[in-house]
Amino acid sequence: MTLTLTHTFLPSSLSSLGQYAVSGLSAGPAQILTLSTTVSTTEGYFALARNGLSNFNNGFGYPQWSGGTPEIDDLFSKSVGLLSFEMSSTDEEIVQGVADILTAGRLSSDAITEVTNAVSQMNDNTVKNKLAQQLISTSPEFHTTNIVERTDDPRSPTPRQERLEEAGYKAVITLNLAGGWDGFNVLTPHTSCELYKSYRNNRRGVALGDREMLAISNDDPEQPCDTFGVHHEIPIFKELYDEGYGQFHANIGHLSKPVTKRNWYTETRTHLFSHTTMEREAQLVDAFQEDGWSTGVGGRMLDILMQHNQSVTAIGIGNKGPIVEGNPSTGRKVMVVPYENVNTVSSFSL
């Protein structure tokens, strides 16, 4: 089995975060590695050996069933591909044969012994081969191309922070909306504000009219308008603002210096017209990156709270966005849970 990965990202759009940045590495696949993706990938390898290439038991294959659970004997017939390798020999030779194919003979003798002990408990030769494939797919040698040196040294866990009872609990929830979002038509000068004429002239045909905006009041004398307008199709923003639970942070960007139409291309440090880059920059809020690596605005907040002996946790839903990445020296990891539910290795895996 040969796994090949090809990507066409520019280095600037694949700049590393956290520990990868400190190590000087740019590893796109490694940056999405979490406990959740590790469990999903492990289940995929297990299902491939057990059921063939199908989606049953969280396999890698394309869905082959419209509903219901197929009979165990019918799994292979519903798969679009199978691992047909099988050895009829001693347990040691079965394990060594599978190890030679999956790890090019790099599997350690200790690992071979452990897998052989597990395989020897099975009676059916086909099951022995499948179990060997499943167990070896979890080894470091299977996931790397170099020689793995086992030190048997215990790993030092990150010290747990104790939360003070009187500190209470607070959470900051960030929703990163996918797709385009015309921020200039979310919060606008109201028609009663002097700036509305300038807004109308610049936005022209897409500018909001009086009937298309919901008025919100402003009592900050440093702001140019006493009344602003919120797009009429997002009334929840007005409701949150009026009730004191919402704020607008306008004119926040990531330019490292003022630029014009004539010099922006040579003077800016980022790709202003790249949707992916702009999404990333919006989460970092760090135009200069003076710390030497990319950290998110939320991650830096957590770093400061840790310095004040606060117990903090970063949680991502579905993935770990750049916004929650902090200083890698803290040892703090981002806990990622899937969109649907917390995934575990199922009882059908082995």
Image (spheres, rainbow, N blue to C red):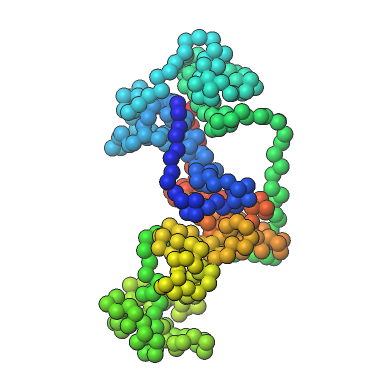
Q: Is residue 125 left or right of residue 332?
A: left
Image label count:
0
Residue 130, above or below 152 = above
Which residue is at a point 37% across and 90% down the rendered structure image?
Answer: 192
Task: Write the residue at 35% across / 24% down.
Answer: 76
Whether residue 119 is visible to the viewer of this picture, yes or no, is no
In the depicted view, which residue is nearer to us: 314 or 263?
263
Measured from the top left, where is residue 166 in percent x and y?
69, 65
Report x, y in % for residue 103: 54, 25
Residue 5 showing in the rendered view: yes
The image shows residue 164 at horizontal and vertical percentages of 70, 61
For the N terminus, the image quarter is top left
Q: Tell me the residue at 57%/57% (across/down).
A: 294
Is 37 in front, or is 72? 37
Location of residue 95 with respect to 223 vertically, above or below: above
Q: Position of residue 162 (x, y in %)?
A: 71, 55
Q: Residue at x 48, y 37 (%)?
A: 41
